[in-house]
Every structure is written in structure tokens, then in C-alpha cells.
Image: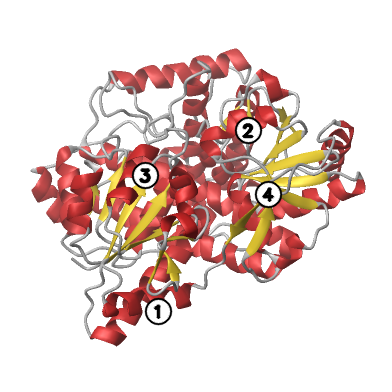
């Protein structure tokens, strides 16, 4: 059962029986923790959302890393349940391991090998702490808790990982429980990635390591249940719900820490054209890394440009006051390779998404923290030596010889409460027909045509609230002068809240909108539905946050099938109003008639 910290009535009491009824009886017995929907499709918890295209060594390494993470989780969970302390040095391993099971986070075989070897150290440390309690008492199949290759050499680890891959493929078609467990695993990976961002900022703001272990303990318990191969539907549903709650809590803490560290946010006009001088391009979503890099870059007279979703950093008063934060460069993630080729200076990536590295800029690309890609210069953490080396290199790079013609883009900060009130006023007055929440991550898969067609075909009296990557699909349409305004000019038709980390702002807006509508109409029929793009582990985690908070009528693209059989999709459609997309025209017709509680 779930540990007492999280044990509560999370789903309707009939949830498990309802799903069993829908499915028509679930298979009994255990299942392999590495599985696929079908043997021919070779889906795994690592590439079902993000295809591994270029490096044949990656899948065996991901399998080996997940196997050692499961063993670590078994010991961690057992120690917690026996009221023993976990050595603090080991806590972060489970988050580092799970977040690294994505080629957009870690596609560097050497760094994966180092993480696997580190995992054996942490597992053995917990096993020693476990002491007299016999390994045989752990609720897992023989071998998982003590799995080890012949040696820790590269060839033996890859060979052992390949054996795990082959065993998974031989399992054939996965059952409904297995697919739900995969959904849960990818959500936990996304939670791990985002909570590491929160922890890094916490340590930067308060100059201390966190003493709170709830997230470490929960993730270890969840992965321990996956390793046990005895997950039932009710337990999976509970873990899915708690994962969503934990994501929302972590992102809420991240938002508070950002305000504490970097000051209040306001609307700004950010320069998007280069200025003369040396330059450093910082990509990602983590403001704490940007602040540290600004400090070291200043010592070497290096100008700093943000890239991608990090444009949000310009809203913060403290960061904006840095004289060497000169602007923003490039477009969005799907153009990353071309933009990095065109930028003539050093490039640093510490969070977000890292696409396969091209040789044309590999010698100028640095990856930090948990992020790494084959071909990039991996500098690990944010030690003084590493940051000094990066800044020194950036100061030597030739960059822009002269100022380009000045161009700027407005980055708007919206007060969620004010927006919610204006939306409610617009609905009551009849100037707003429907509100669409557009979230998730398009990643590198570029299903942008669907999103663009969806917005273009919607009624003119519709409003779109975007978070995540949706705004990138819309391009110049996001600008008020292009998309138009509504409610007497009080609101643009497209309102962007920021990157996926702002899912918590979207949740706050939805609840405030609902509250304002009830105050005005005495009805809970709020005309809001959601289009969500599920293309990476963070987007999976944030989808769980929406579901846990009670958001319903969510249409998901590009597909749900990697995780859900037809019967499980039917259950989620009935219970949580979660549907796969079809065509923009058909989906708009359906969604425009829905309310948040239908």
C-alpha cells in the first residue's frame, strides 16, 4: 500500500472496479518493468515519447540505468518503511537517474555510463544501511535489487543493458496495467526533471540543501512498486494522482522561489537583434543557472543572450538589471539546431530540451547540470571552475562585429486574477464564446500545423490561454496586432503564460476563472476546454497535474496510444474526459460546446 504520507482517498472509490469493468477483466500476475505495447513497436519507458534515432548504445544504457534505479528505489522504500534514515548523499540519485531517461535530457553515452556506475555506489550504500534485513524480503522479483553486469566496464554494461532490452521485447504485447505503469513511469521522469530545477533554485536562494525528503521518498516508493511487478489498477491510479499533485506543488514552490530570488515580474520589450561584442547564448528554462552565468560572464565582458523559453527571465527585475543581459536570440526549440549554427559564440544548455548536436557548433556547445548530449562539452555541475572556464572561452570567441538594426519583442506578464475576471466579464457580456487552454510540449515532433489550424478555424470570439510550446506553433499570430483583441480591447485573443513550468499558473487561472463565473452567474458551467500536446516527459508530468487538479475535457495529441489500449482510453474518456485529438475542425466543434465540468 502507499506510505502513510500519501495514503488518502485520491480517486473515486469505484475507480478500480470501473476500470476493471471497462476492460473486462485485467490479467493477473506480474509483468516485466521494461515492456512494449507490441513487440514490433519496441516502445519503452524511454523512447515511447521521444524516439532515439542516432545512437544505438542509448537504449541498452537507458535500460541499465532504469534497472539500477529500480534496485535503488527498492532499498530506499524499504528503509523508509522500517523508519530508518536515508543517507543524504544518495537522495538525488533517483531524480537524476529518472530525468536522464530521455534523449532530450541526456544522450551522452559516457555520462549515462557514469550515472549507472554512480547508481551502483548509491544502491550498495543503501544496501549496507539495510543491514540485517535480508534482501530476499524485498517485494521484487529475484535479481532486480542486486542486478549487476559482469563488470562495470562500458562493454559489460551495454551488453547487460541489451539483455534487458531483448527480454523486454520477448514479452510481446503489454497488458493494460503495464501500459498504465509506463504512463506513470514517464510522469515520474518528468516530475524528477522539474523538481531538480526547484531544488537547484532552492539551494541558490537559501544557500543550503533542502532537508525535505518527501519527493525523494515518494518517487522511490512509486518506482519500487513498478519494480515489484505487482501493480494493480487502483494503486497505479493513486500514484498517477499523487504524481500530478507533487508536480503542482513543486512548480508552485519554484514560482515562489523565482519571485524571492529575482524580484517581481512585469511586461518588458526585449531586444532580439545582436549587439557588438563577444556573446554567450543561454538556453533552457532555469533562471538560477542564468543568474550565475551572468555573474561570471560579466567578469570577462561577455554579453549574454537568452534562448527559447528563457526569454521569460527578462520579466524579472533583478535579472533585467544585469547590464550584460543584452537580449534574446533565435526562435523556438524545433529550430534549435539551425539557431545554434547561426549563433557565433558559446552556447550553454542546462535545462529544457537538447536536440542532437551538429558538428558545426559542437565545439562551442556546453551542457551543464543533468543535461548532456553526445558531441557537446559536458561540464557537469555549476562549480566555480566550470563556470570560469565557460566564461573564459566565451570571452575568446569572436561574436558580433557591430550592432544590428534594433528589433524588440514584447514579453507580457499577465496577472492571473485580473485575466480571470476579464474572461468572466467577457463571457457574461457575450463578447467571449469559449476559452481554450493550449498546453504541453510540441518538442521536436512539429505537429504545429494542427495547432495553427485549430486556432485559425476557431470562432473570432474565442480566447486562447497558452503555456508550454503552443505559442511557438502560432508564430506571429501570438502578437495582439495579429490575433486581435476581445472584450473591448481589454484582452488579446492569445494570452501566453510561459513555459511548461507555468502549468501552476494555468491551474490557478482555471480555478480563478471558475470562481469568477460562479460569482457572476451562480453556475459552475464554465466554457473552457483544453488542447494538450504530449511529446516529452515533462509534458506527461504536467498533464497529470491538470488531471489531479480536476481539469477535465482535455483533448490530447499527437496520440495516447503509447500508453493506453482502447479499453483504458475508454475508461479515461469516461472518468476524466480525456480524449485523443482527431482533426482541428471536428475537435473545435466538440470542444466549443463543452464546459469545465461537463
CB within 8 Å, label 4 to label 1? no
Q: Earlier in the sequence, mark 4 or mark 1?
A: 4
Left or right of 259? Residue 300 is right
Q: Earlier in the sequence, mark 2 or mark 1?
A: 2
CB within 8 Å, label 3 to label 4? no
Q: Nearer the viewer, mark 4 or mark 2?
A: 4
Q: Is residue 80 visible in the rendered structure shown here?
A: no
Residue toward you, 456 or 250: 456
Q: Residue 83 appears at what percent x and percent y?
A: 52, 60
Q: Earlier in the sequence, mark 4 or mark 2?
A: 2
Q: Earlier in the sequence, mark 3 or mark 4?
A: 4
Q: Which mark is residue 421?
A: 1
CB within 8 Å, label 3 to label 2? no
* Residue found 19% across the figure and 44% down from its top: 568
CB within 8 Å, label 2 to label 1? no
Q: Residue 258 appears at what percent x and percent y?
A: 65, 64
Q: Is residue 43 above or below residue 278?
A: above
Q: Nearer the viewer, mark 1 or mark 3?
A: 3
* Residue found 58% across the figure and 40% down from its top: 331
Q: Nearer the viewer, mark 4 or mark 1?
A: 4
Q: Earlier in the sequence, mark 1 or mark 3?
A: 1
Q: Is residue 360 above or below residue 400?
A: above
Label 4 secondary element: loop
* Residue found 81% across the figure and 58% down from its top: 322
Residue indicated by mark 3: 452
Quadrant in the rendering for residue 239: bottom left
CA separation in Å, label 4 and label 2: 17 Å
Q: Which mark is residue 140?
A: none
Residue indicated by mark 2: 339
Residue indicated by mark 4: 407
Amino acid at each position: 500500500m502507499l506510505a502513510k504520507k500519501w495514503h488518502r482517498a485520491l480517486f473515486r472509490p469505484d475507480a478500480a472496479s470501473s476500470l476493471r469493468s471497462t476492460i473486462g477483466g485485467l490479467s493477473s500476475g506480474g509483468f516485466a518493468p521494461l515492456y512494449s505495447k507490441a513487440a514490433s513497436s519496441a516502445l519503452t519507458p524511454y523512447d515511447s515519447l521521444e524516439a532515439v534515432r542516432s545512437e544505438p548504445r542509448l537504449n541498452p544504457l537507458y535500460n541499465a540505468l532504469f534497472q539500477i534505479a529500480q534496485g535503488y528505489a527498492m532499498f530506499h522504500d524499504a528503509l523508509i518503511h522500517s523508519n530508518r534514515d536515508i543517507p543524504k548523499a544518495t537522495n538525488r540519485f533517483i531524480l537524476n537517474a529518472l530525468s536522464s531517461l530521455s534523449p532530450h535530457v541526456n544522450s551522452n553515452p559516457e555520462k549515462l555510463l557514469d550515472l549507472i556506475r554512480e547508481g551502483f555506489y548509491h544502491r550498495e550504500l543503501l544496501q549496507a544501511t539495510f543491514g540485517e534485513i535480508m534482501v530476499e524480503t524485498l517485494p521484487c522479483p529475484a535479481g532486480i535489487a542486486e542486478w549487476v553486469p559482469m563488470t562495470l566496464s562500458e562493454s559489460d554494461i551495454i551488453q547487460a543493458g541489451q539483455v534487458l532490452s531483448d527480454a523486454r521485447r520477448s514479452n510481446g504485447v503489454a497488458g493494460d496495467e503495464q501500459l498504465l505503469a509506463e504512463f506513470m513511469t514517464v510522469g515520474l521522469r518528468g516530475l524528477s526533471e522539474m523538481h531538480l530545477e526547484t531544488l537547484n533554485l532552492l539551494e541558490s536562494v537559501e544557500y543550503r540543501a533542502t532537508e525535505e525528503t518527501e519527493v525523494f521518498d515518494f518517487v522511490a516508493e512509486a518506482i519500487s512498486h513498478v519494480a515489484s511487478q505487482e501493480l494493480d489498477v487502483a494503486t497505479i491510479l493513486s500514484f498517477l494522482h499523487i504524481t500530478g499533485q507533487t508536480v503542482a506543488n513543486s512548480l508552485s514552490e519554484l514560482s515562489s522561489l523565482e519571485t524571492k530570488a529575482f524580484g517581481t515580474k512585469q511586461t518588458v520589450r526585449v531586444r532580439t537583434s545582436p549587439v557588438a561584442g563577444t556573446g554567450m547564448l543561454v538556453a533552457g528554462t532555469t533562471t538560477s543557472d542564468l543568474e550565475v552565468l551572468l555573474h561570471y560572464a560579466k567578469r570577462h565582458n561577455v554579453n549574454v543572450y537568452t534562448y527559447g523559453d528563457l526569454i521569460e527571465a527578462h520579466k524579472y527585475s533583478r535579472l533585467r538589471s544585469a547590464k550584460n543581459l543584452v537580449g534574446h536570440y533565435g526562435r523556438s526549440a524545433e529550430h534549435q539546431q539551425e539557431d545554434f549554427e547561426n549563433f557565433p559564440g558559446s552556447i550553454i544548455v542546462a535545462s529544457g530540451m537538447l536536440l542532437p548536436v551538429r558538428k558545426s557548433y559542437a565545439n562551442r556547445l556546453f551542457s551543464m547540470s543533468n543535461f548532456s548530449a553526445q558531441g557537446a562539452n559536458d561540464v557537469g555541475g555549476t562549480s566555480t571552475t566550470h563556470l570560469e572556464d565557460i566564461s573564459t572561452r566565451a570571452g575568446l570567441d569572436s561574436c558580433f562585429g557591430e550592432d544590428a538594426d534594433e528589433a524588440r519583442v514584447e514579453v507580457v506578464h499577465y496577472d492571473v486574477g485580473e485575466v480571470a475576471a476579464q474572461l468572466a466579464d467577457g463571457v457574461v457580456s457575450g463578447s467571449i464564446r469559449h476559452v481554450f487552454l493550449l498546453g504541453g510540449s510540441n518538442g521536436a515532433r512539429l505537429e504545429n500545423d494542427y495547432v495553427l489550424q485549430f486556432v485559425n478555424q476557431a470562432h473570432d470570439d474565442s480566447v486562447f490561454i497558452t503555456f508550454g510550446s503552443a505559442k511557438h506553433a502560432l508564430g506571429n499570430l501570438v502578437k495582439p496586432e495579429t490575433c486581435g483583441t476581445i472584450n473591448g480591447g481589454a484582452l488579446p485573443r492569445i494570452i501566453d503564460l510561459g513555459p511548461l513550468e507555468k502549468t501552476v499558473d494555468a491551474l490557478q487561472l482555471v480555478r480563478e476563472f471558475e470562481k469568477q463565473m460562479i460569482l457572476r452567474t451562480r453556475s459552475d458551467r464554465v466554457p473552457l476546454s483544453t488542447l494538450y500536446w504530449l511529446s516529452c516527459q515533462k509534458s506527461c508530468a504536467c498533464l497529470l497535474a491538470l488531471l489531479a487538479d480536476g481539469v477535465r475535457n482535455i483533448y490530447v495529441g499527437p496520440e495516447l496510444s503509447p500508453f493506453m489500449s482502447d479499453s483504458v482510453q475508454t475508461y479515461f474518456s469516461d472518468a476524466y474526459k480525456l480524449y485523443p485529438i482527431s482533426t482541428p475542425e471536428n475537435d473545435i466543434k466538440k470542444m466549443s460546446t463543452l464546459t469545465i465540468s461537463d
